[in-house]
Amino acid sequence: MRGRNHPVTGARRRRGAGLLTAAVAGALVAGTVTVVVGTPALTANRADDRAPAPQAAPASAEPVRQVVDTCAPAVAQLSPRDRLAQRLMVGVDASDPAGAATIVRDSKVGGVFLGGNGTALLQDGRMQALQDASPTPLAVAVDEEGGRVQRIDELDGDIPSARSMAASSTPDEVTGIARERAAQLRARGVTWNLAPTVDVSDQPRTSVIGDRAFSGDPETVTRYAQAWAQGQQAGGVFGVLKHFPGHGSSSGDSHEGSVSTPPLDQLQRSDLLPYEALVGPGKPLDGQVGVMLGHLDVPGLTTDVPTSVEPAAYRLLREQYRFDGVVMTDDLGAMKAITDRFGLAESTVLALSAGADIALFSNVTPVGPLLDAAERALADGRITPEANDAAVARVLESKGLCTRG
């Protein structure tokens, strides 16, 4: 998503602590504790052909770690409909705090997106009422990239675009900018920022990606995206890399209609390099960020539908790039690359069944029909209970509510 006219958390609250306490206790009672034990070194004595004798672990050996899956019992506490609700992030009107609270209370969604120019919800502690309306701590998300995509500039000042930051600041300085901005967002009740953009693009500044990209050079994008993401995390806000598998060299604007990219093998040589460098086991942002899939037609990857609702795109992210964190769609409610092809309920089911953990809607739209459609899909097997529970576990973990074993 982009721009001020396009409306898109991990809040820890005392009420959430009760959920976690019960979850941990349930895990212990159910015997779901996994103990990971380091293997002592073995020394073979082949002179007399005796079996190797175990030796005492050195004093510096890593201690035994206990990994308790607190997400499974937390998911089990939710009804099937409420589990599906955790997988929706819906738009609310930031100029209408009461209306936003009603949406959250009635739907029990897992997250909301604040878009547009309204700021009432971001002032005078009103966000707490929104959290109080939710039975589970709520993810509160914005697009705060800098430049032409900002949400709190009228309240806390302007920050440069990604391209400007990369041209005029060091990565360490960008980490500082991101940390400060995240702290400002967090102070206003925002817990997720759908940034940084990791698209590789040297398109003109005002094009759909343009100066939202740090650079047209994949290595530069990687350095600065990492700097922004780590600063953002240090400021207490959960970040989301976007727009997988790469919007930077696309043919058009997915807000306005279908978008084509170069073939997958070409994306893998450029646009996908930041993901390869940043996410997956052992990578700098492993376990720290989510990933957003764009609405992109990619030769060699998609056929009749864009990446956000294409199972092969999610498999690419999960299997080739080994990303195990939360994955969300770009806006399904106000971008014509999707809305010209599918209704809102249909796109919800397509996205959740394809592999998205979270279906995102920037616009204020009735949530009931989306959940009704998802429930039918769960009942008829298009969404399997196992995949649904795994997705909900990732969502809860990304909000800081539990840990997967």
Image (tube, rainbow, N blue to C red):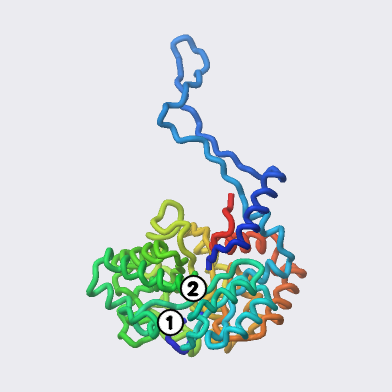
SS class of the residue under badge 2? loop
Q: Residues within 10 Å of mark 1 (few under 14, many from 20)?
A: many
Q: What is the residue that sits farthest to the right in this orientation?
A: 379
Q: Is residue 106 left or right of residue 311?
A: right
What is the distance, in whole Å, between disc 1 and disc 2 at their CAs?
11 Å
| Amino acid bearing label 2 | Val
Q: Residue at x 50, y 18 (%)?
A: 53
| Amino acid bearing label 1 | Arg
Of the numbered discs in the image, which one, if any, rests on residue 138?
A: none
Q: State whether residue 304 appears in this view.
A: no
Q: Residues within 10 Å of mark 2 (few under 14, many from 20)?
A: many
Q: What is the residue that sits farthest to the front in this orientation?
A: 124
- Residue under pointer 2: 190
Q: Position of residue 376 (x, y in %)?
A: 75, 74
Q: Earlier in the sequence, mark 1 or mark 2?
A: 1
Q: Position of residue 7 (x, y in %)?
A: 51, 85
- Residue under pointer 1: 151
Q: State whether residue 103 appears in this view.
A: yes
Q: Residue at x 30, y 68 (%)?
A: 174
Q: Are marks 1 and 2 in contact (CB under 8 Å)?
A: yes
| Res. 132 image quadrant | bottom right
- Look at the picture and state if 70 lies above or below 186: above
SS class of the residue under badge 1? loop
Q: Residue at x 47, y 66 (%)?
A: 238
Q: Nearer the viewer, residue 85 or 206?
A: 85
- Look at the picture and state if 255 lies above or below 232: below
| Res. 75 image quadrant | bottom right
Q: Position of residue 87 (x, y in %)?
A: 62, 70
Q: What is the residue that sits farthest to the left in this orientation?
A: 168
- Look at the picture and state if 122 lies above or below 223: below
